[in-house]
Image (spheres, rainbow, N blue to C red):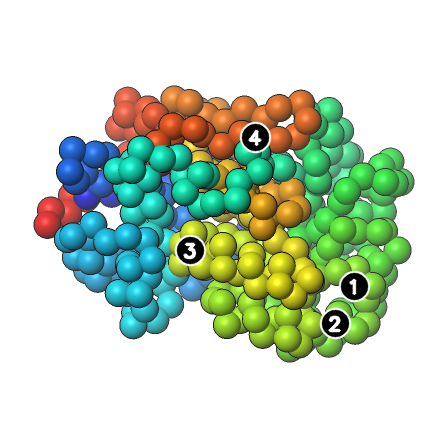
């Protein structure tokens, strides 16, 4: 297995309540076994701001604990079982679990979307826009709508929400709109959160702390906008508990945060069984990670548009030579080739790689 630590410049800085991203440092995994080459991406960032993992911890867990489990090419579900005693480190685990999905699909000459079952044949695509001045944001929304995006999501932060959303709603009273606070509020902000109810948002994503469930349930009793949880849902148990206590009606499923595709599908199933909804989020993935997300988002259990825009929105150049294109109707068709079906642009991978490791077993 090779791990490449790459650095891809973003076209424009991506601003959330957690900070600003100017470049995406992506960890790309390349695995060779049985004359096949499988790919994956670890979605950690340089800093442990979104979750407690970062690139360094993920590299350590992959190199020192997970790589040895690959010795007999376990199926993804077997891998999940074998590493269950390692607590946390979901993003590191997900990188290997997804690598095994790509590997086994290629072994069976089957596309990932097909292997995941119940495919709609397309993913419905929304866009996540970073925070900006209202006038710039309106321009970005206008551009996104003209491209056919099915839902617009705006990153917000405490104290900056009302004017921003009001200025957008003044121009676009009816578009499918949601907001994501990445955990920036607490229950002391109840008045500010209640004021957003009047804007008819599809949902409010992760308003409260990253590991909270209970306060979200309290908030849900006070506001009419449905709550969508992202950061708080780190396991099947927490997904079940969120629905049990009515802390959320919608879950943003991210394979990295949940330890892989198997758990992601299971969480989407839990949402469905509880009368809720699920959609696939994004972590500014390169074309490699994005191919997994698009395949997952094409599953029938993902019943709301996801943050799975084509990469031309974020990067001048992707590390795959067959990046996704979105249709005018706001959908992307998952790759039909074996596995994730991406062709790696090895030349650009080499150019953008800052450091790499080889693990031989
Ligand atoms: Mg989010």
Classify mark 3: residues with Cα within 10 Å, few (<14), some (14-19) or many (20+).
Answer: some
**Foreground disc of the pair 2, 1:** 2
Separation of residues labelled 1 and 3 (CA atoms): 34 Å
Taking the spot 41% from the left edge, 39% from the top edge, the residue there is 112
Residue position marked by numbered label 4 in the rendering? 332
Circle on res. 193? 1
The Cα–Cα distance between marks 4 and 2, rounded to whole angstroms, is: 35 Å
Q: At which x and y percent is residue 345?
A: 33, 24
- What x and y, as percent, mark residue 13? 55, 38
Name the residue at 38% across, 22% down.
321
Residue drawn at the location 67% of the way across and 60% of the way down: 276
Q: In this view, does 65 lie to the left or right of 131?
A: left
State the SS at label 4.
strand
Residue 236 vs 147, above or below: the answer is below
Q: Is residue 311 visible?
A: no
Residue depth check, mark 4 versus mark 2: number of the one nearer the observer: 4
Distance of label 3 from label 4 (alpha carbons): 22 Å
Which quadrant of the figure has residue 30? top left
Q: How crowded is mark 4: few (under 14 residues within 10 Å), some or many (20 or more)?
A: many
Left/right placement of residue 217 relative to residue 116 reads right
Q: Distance between the residues labelled 2 and 1?
A: 9 Å
Residues under numbered marks 2 and 1 in contact, where contact means CB atoms less than 8 Å apart: yes
């Amino acid at each position: 297995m090779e791990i490449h630590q790459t650095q891809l410049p973003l076209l424009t800085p991506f601003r959330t309540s957690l900070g600003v991203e100017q470049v995406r440092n992506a960890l790309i995994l390349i695995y060779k076994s049985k004359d096949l080459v499988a790919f994956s991406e670890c979605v950690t960032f340089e800093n442990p701001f979104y979750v407690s993992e970062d690139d360094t911890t993920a590299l350590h867990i992959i190199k020192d604990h997970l790589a040895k489990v690959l010795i007999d090419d376990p199926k993804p579900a077997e891998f999940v079982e074998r590493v269950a005693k390692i607590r946390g480190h979901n993003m590191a685990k997900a990188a290997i679990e997804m690598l095994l999905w790509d590997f086994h699909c290629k072994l069976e000459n089957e596309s990932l979307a097909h292997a995941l079952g119940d495919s709609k044949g397309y993913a419905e695509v929304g866009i996540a826009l970073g925070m900006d001045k209202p006038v710039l944001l309106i321009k970005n929304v206008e551009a996104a709508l003209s491209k056919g995006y099915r839902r617009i999501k705006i990153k917000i932060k405490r104290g900056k929400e009302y004017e921003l959303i009001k200025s957008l709603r003044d121009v676009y009273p009816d578009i499918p709109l949601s907001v994501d606070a990445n955990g920036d509020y607490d229950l002391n902000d109840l008045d500010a959160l209640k004021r957003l109810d009047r804007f008819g948002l599809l949902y409010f994503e992760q308003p409260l702390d990253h590991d909270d469930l209970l306060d979200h349930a309290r908030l849900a009793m006070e506001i009419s906008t449905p709550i969508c949880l992202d950061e708080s849902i780190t396991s099947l148990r927490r997904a079940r508990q969120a629905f049990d206590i009515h802390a959320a009606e919608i879950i943003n499923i991210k394979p990295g945060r949940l330890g892989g595709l198997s758990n992601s599908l299971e969480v989407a199933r839990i949402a469905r069984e509880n009368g809720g909804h699920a959609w696939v989020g994004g972590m500014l993935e390169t074309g490699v990670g994005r191919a997994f997300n698009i395949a997952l988002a094409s599953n029938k259990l993902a019943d709301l548009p996801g943050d799975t825009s084509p990469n031309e929105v974020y990067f001048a150049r992707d590390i795959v030579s067959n990046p996704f294109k979105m249709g005018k109707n706001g959908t992307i068709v998952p790759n039909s080739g074996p596995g994730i079906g991406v062709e790696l642009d090895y030349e650009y991978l080499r150019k953008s790689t800052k450091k790499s490791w080889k693990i031989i077993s």
